[in-house]
Amino acid sequence: MGAKRQAKKQFEKELELEKLRNKSAAAQQRKEIQQAKFDAMTPEELAKFRKKRLKIFAIVGGVFVALMVIGSVGGNDSGTSSSGKTTVKQFPATIEAINVINPATVNVTFNVKNDGNTDISPSCTINVKDASNTYHGYDIFVIKEPMSPGQQRNGVGPITVTKQGAAFVTESSISCTAETSDTTSNAGKAVKIISINPNKAPLSDFDSDTNSWYWGVSLRADAKPWTRLTCTQTAFDVSGKEIAKHTYPANVVNDGTVIAYGNNVTSMPDTTKAIAKAIKDVKVSCHL
């Protein structure tokens, strides 16, 4: 990736990282306040609190506030609410990273996406362990702030590992579910493009650092921040003939700006000089 494209992508990442850092600091402050409340409790109050097996953990690292439930959580094993109008549906989720923070605790970074067509507040069960299952732990995170269709959230939460075995954790799993009346998927649903190339930048250009030509445009979409998309840019010559096409995973940030998502992913791919010079128009489509 050339200097121009790298600088643009780095700038976009820095904006997101700065937001994450600011919100992470707020999360740490909330955690300290909550800990102070625990310290101020009498043994009787603390015992009563622990008996409920609940504690509030604020995760604001750019994402959400979660309710972390320690231990097993009761529910309807049939997967259907008593009213019969909603069902429990599973939603796509991944573990992004696991970091040891002390001998008995790991921090788990995870991601969940709403691929349905209604707002949801999913609960995510995360399990961690070593290969022999000698050291293990789990917690359940309930996302209290509703997620709109297409939105994805990243969060970081601590999990206690048995026998002070945090350093031995090598395996993990995640399952995110939510009660919903919607049994459909929004996968493939088109998203409205608000603007293409709002800065009126060249549709193609030469990168002197990599000695290569590239093409592509910036865009904005009618979607909420943290919505995950798949976008396709198609280039046409003066006669309207398609001469290049590029599809890539993308993420929506504030004001609807769409950026390429993932390592070594770009919205501005390399091409030949002939094609770059021939591009006269670029059309864009994005879907969930």
Image (cartoon, rainbow, N blue to C red):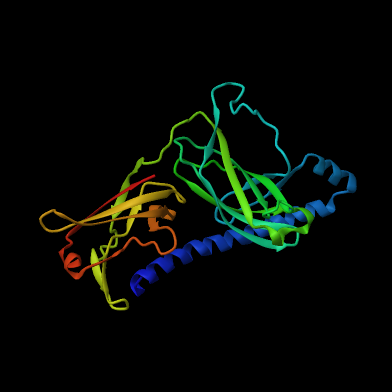
Toward the left, the furthest residue is 239
Please indicate, yes or no, whether residue 122 appears anywhere in the rendered image: no
Identify which residue, 61 or 174, lies in the foreground: 174
82 sits to left or right of 8: right
Toward the right, the furthest residue is 43
Q: Quadrant of the N terminus?
A: bottom left
Identify which residue, 30 or 281, lies in the foreground: 281
Please indicate, yes or no, whether residue 31 appears anywhere in the rendered image: yes
Q: How many marks?
A: 0
Toward the front, the furthest residue is 132
For residue 102, which quarter of the picture?
bottom right
Name the residue: 58% across, 56% down.
61
Residue 25: percent from left, percent from top: 63, 62
Name the residue: 58% across, 49% down.
64
112 sits to left or right of 192: right
Residue 194: percent from left, percent from top: 31, 49
Identify which residue, 224 or 92, lies in the foreground: 92
Name the residue: 62% across, 22% down.
82
174 sits to left or right of 238: right
Residue 167: percent from left, percent from top: 70, 62
